[in-house]
Image: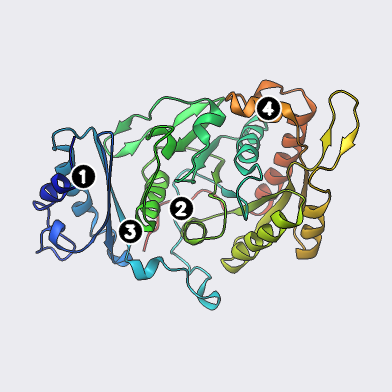
């Protein structure tokens, strides 16, 4: 298997960003990761020179693929470290022309949460499938590099094939899907620094053959850190859906999510209260395990739409773990109806005010 030194030696044959110094000596390599014959390299560049640096990136990938023991290589271009830091609030709004638009994709929406463990990924998958049932062509991107959930939720175990540098997304239940989890093992820890994460996300957006989609659903990583802010600023989002449970601790973090999207001028399509209540399958009694109504009150407080309540139910959890989301496994059931009602509201909002298909990718 190739070592880090093997990688650096191979990159000696590639000229760095200045066109003179070997890449391995240029100081531009910000991350190297080697897992099971797969090599990931991140190169820091001036973002305004991204187009000019593309031949260097391709040459680096070619050099790495020639190494003995390397089955695949992914080289990402990222901004300089100083550009990775979240800007102060006054400068947080994106400038026109900097957002990444995907040809053929009419709408990109983010499903986000201020913290993990609130059922965001389950909600994102069932919303995507519900939008498909409403007649839209749908794709879903798992943007959580450290904890990808899409392979399990959609029951996908294959690896995406490639055509040149373009990845062909997998498909499940009529929805196109992409996740870093398709490329690494279930138990493999992604010990990546920020620039490598940003590069991987950009490539899963830019170098995937999404085709014609009415909507791409992005399952965002939990929280409001650098990864979330960078995604919100660099992708042409038509809006965001915030997922929270009713209890105060989750709502505090949900407020941060709303505030982040407000700062980057991304519309809030609405708030979903997940695990809103529990109905006992034996006696029919209802219990508000995490409280109830907190997300609705937060939506009213911020003047954003409240999309609805999703119950805490064993069937939703069991079917998600089995790779057959409730919208697929029990399409006529009450829980699937809840998700379709949420999706119908989102679809109506996007049809009313979302940007149309982008003619080209714009990266500065």
Q: CA distance from mark 4 to mark 3?
A: 38 Å
Q: Residue at coordinates 48% horizontally, 26% vertically from top-left?
A: 156
Q: Position of residue 328 (x, y in %)?
A: 65, 24
Q: CA distance from mark 1 to mark 2?
A: 25 Å
How many marks on residues?
4
**Chain-order first, disc 4 or disc 2:** 2
* Mark 3 element type: strand
Q: Position of residue 22 (x, y in %)?
A: 10, 59
Front label number (4 vs 2): 4
- Frontmost residue, 209 versus 73: 73
**Which quarter of the figure has residue 266?**
bottom right
Horizontal side, residue 140 vs residue 197: left or right: right
Contact between labelled residues 4 and 1, with CB atoms less than 8 Å apart: no
Q: Residue at coordinates 76% horizontally, 39% vertically from top-left?
A: 310
**Chain-order first, disc 1 or disc 4:** 1
Which residue corresponds to mark 1?
61
Contact between labelled residues 2 and 1, with CB atoms less than 8 Å apart: no
Front label number (1 vs 2): 1
- Frontmost residue, 106 versus 164: 164
Q: Which mark is residue 326?
A: 4
* Mark 4 element type: helix
Q: Position of residue 255 (x, y in %)?
A: 68, 62
Q: Quadrant of the C terminus?
A: bottom left
Count residues near mark 1 (Cα–Cα under 10 Å), then give few for <14, some for 14-19, many for 20+: many
Is residue 269 in sight in this rendering?
yes
Which residue corresponds to mark 2?
101
Which residue corresponds to mark 3?
78
- Frontmost residue, 350 versus 245: 245
* Mark 1 element type: helix
**Chain-order first, disc 3 or disc 2:** 3
């Amino acid at each position: 298997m190739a070592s880090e030194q093997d990688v650096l030696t191979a990159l000696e044959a590639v000229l760095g960003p200045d066109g003179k110094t070997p890449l391995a000596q240029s100081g531009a390599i910000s991350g190297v990761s080697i897992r099971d014959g797969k090599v990931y390299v991140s190169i820091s560049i001036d973002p305004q020179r991204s187009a000019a640096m593309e031949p260097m990136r391709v040459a680096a990938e070619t050099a790495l693929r020639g190494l003995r023991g390397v089955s695949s290589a992914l080289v990402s271009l990222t901004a300089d470290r100083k550009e990775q830091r979240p800007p102060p609030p006054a400068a947080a709004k994106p400038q026109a022309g900097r957002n990444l638009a995907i040809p053929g994709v009419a709408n990109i929406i983010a499903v986000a949460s201020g913290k993990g463990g609130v059922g965001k990924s389950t909600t994102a998958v069932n919303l995507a499938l519900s939008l498909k049932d409403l007649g839209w062509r749908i794709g879903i991107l798992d943007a959580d590099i450290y904890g990808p959930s899409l392979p399990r939720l959609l029951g996908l175990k294959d690896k995406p094939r490639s055509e040149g540098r373009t990845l062909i997304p997998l498909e499940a239940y009529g929805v196109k899907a992409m996740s870093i989890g398709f490329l690494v093992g279930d138990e493999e820890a992604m010990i990546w620094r920020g620039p490598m994460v940003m590069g991987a996300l950009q490539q899963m957006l830019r170098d995937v053959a999404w085709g014609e989609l009415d909507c791409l659903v992005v399952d965002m990583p939990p929280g409001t850190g650098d990864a979330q802010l960078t995604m919100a600023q660099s992708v042409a989002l038509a809006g965001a859906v915030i997922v929270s449970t009713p209890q105060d601790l989750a709502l505090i973090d949900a407020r941060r999510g709303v505030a982040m999207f407000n700062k980057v001028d991304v519309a809030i399509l609405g708030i979903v209260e997940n695990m809103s209540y529990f109905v006992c399958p034996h006696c029919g009694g209802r219990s508000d395990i995490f409280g109830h109504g907190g997300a609705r009150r937060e939506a009213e407080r911020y003047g954003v739409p409240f999309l609805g309540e999703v119950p805490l139910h064993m069937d939703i959890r069991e079917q998600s773990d089995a790779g057959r989301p409730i919208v697929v496994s029990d399409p006529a059931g009450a829980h699937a109806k809840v998700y379709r009602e949420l999706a119908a509201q989102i679809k109506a909002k996007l049809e009313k005010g979302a940007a149309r298909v982008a003619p080209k990718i714009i990266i500065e």
